[in-house]
Image (tube, grey):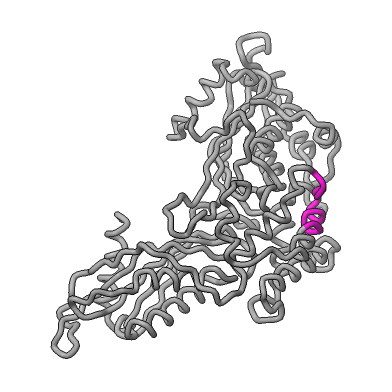
Amino acid sequence: MGALDEGHFDAELEHGVKLGCLELGGEEEPDTLAIQDAVKVLLQGLGEDVNREGLKKTPLRVAKAFLEGTRGYRQYVKDIVQGALFPEAGLDKEIGHAGGAGGLVIVRDLNLFSYCESCLLPFQVKCHVGYVPSGQRVVGLSKLSRVSDVFAKRLQDPQRLANEIASALQSGIKPAGVAVVLQCLHIQFPASLASNHEDWVKIQVTSGSGAFKDEKAGVWGDFLSLLKFRGININESCTRDSTGKSWCPSRSPSSCTTCSSFGSMNSRMVTAVTPIIRSLGEDPSRKELVGTPSRFVKWLMNFQNTNLPTKLNGCTIHKVDSLSNGEVNGEMEQIFSELNLPFWSQCEHHLLPFHGSVHIGYFHREGFSPSVKSLLQSIVHFYGFKLQVQERLTRQIAETVSALLGGDVMVVVEAYHTCMISRGIEKFGSSTATIAVLGRFSTDSVARAKFLDSISEANGR
């Protein structure tokens, strides 16, 4: 636990500008134009045609998303806090742990997102903030959320984010102490496409000042107990260790295993990322950001426009109960299904990742023993590892499988889109489902229902 104490940060707390004085993402703004030019270089490096429909406005959309997601560089805490301090009679500061209104105040479950400074991908944050009032004054509760959001909307590391929130509140409202707990989720690309893996890296960090500076202080116990009222349990196993090792998956030794099979990095692409970082308001030479352009490009190279399919073995074919009206040449047909095939893709509109599961159903005669297990997963990966939109991905998988397995195919794609937690939308926990039906599935509602039921049963829904 601790609080940030850096010169540039102290200066920021002393000086402020009016919030909202800058329009974000104007098409002719120099920063917007610089990011657009860089994005065009990245798209060309991926083998894409920047003038094709669907990509024409991608550079502008990416620029707006980046500038919106890092607007905290153009906002200052002083402007938020100064007009939101209210007198409240209570205990004198010499009595117990608290002054002002007389006790611990916390705001729980603030949903934030930030951009990882190591790889430029968004990560999710569940933020819990508490303070002990002092000097017989309290701060408007919404300001705890706004201050937290100012620092989240920057290129960040979880521990520094927690430290900056704690330091800013301590400086701005002069309480007896501030506590911050962050629970963070970072998307994780699989080291091996054939292995089971967690979709997210999870970490929790804490920071405290004043009465909370000592992590063994009793007031921390009060804070954590109030979190438990909401079913929030602080898991020590997810807390960052004292070694300071980076939590970002892009820094792990296995991070390049997958991308290396898709092609080499383009030095022109790496160079193009530097002006993006500068246009957001950061110093690309800051030590934590020096390797960021290379790591971002390594991620993008997974989605290079290529005709090289990815092989994956180990899928399992599941049978669904046979349908009484499904006969061909007197032989009973059944619905076979391949469920929960993992996929990864990159949204072509915003260059943000989305991932999830693909479910494929098809008719075939009873007793059929298919040898297409790995092929179906290869099809999913082939269309996933491109700049995509989910609707097209679903259709392409269905059409390709239909050509291989006789025409009667149904495909369901379920996905989590990081563009739904960024770009000012911030719809945490939402997911998207798309369906494509071909052949008999398009007219047979009973067949569709049986296949959809099999997905629910397989996933315990």
Residue toward you, 138 or 451: 451
Q: What is the number of callouts on the image? A: 0
Q: Position of residue 345 (x, y in %)?
A: 54, 65
Residue at position x 27%, y 79% from top?
A: 363
Horizontal side, residue 441 vs residue 237: left or right: left
Q: Residue at x 63, y 13 (%)?
A: 91
Q: Up-down: is 400 above or below 146?
A: below
Is 281 covered by the magenta stretch? yes
Q: Is residue 433 left or right of residue 76?
A: left
Image quarter of the N terminus = top right
Provide residue 136's location: percent of width, then percent of height.
69, 19
Q: Residue 283, how many percent across, how many down? A: 82, 48
Q: Which residues are magenta?
A: 274-286
**Is residue 230 part of the magenta span, yes or no?**
no
Is 104 above or below relative to 298?
A: above
The residue at the point 82 percent across, 52 percent down is: 21
Instruction: Determine the residue positioned at 78% across, 51% down.
Output: 20
Residue 60 lies, in percent from the top left, at 73, 68
Q: Quadrant of residue 157?
A: top right
**Quarter of image, res 147:** top right
Relative horizontal placement of residue 40, taking residue 244 as reference (left or right): right
Image quarter in which the C terminus is found: bottom left
* Left or right for 395, reference 277: left
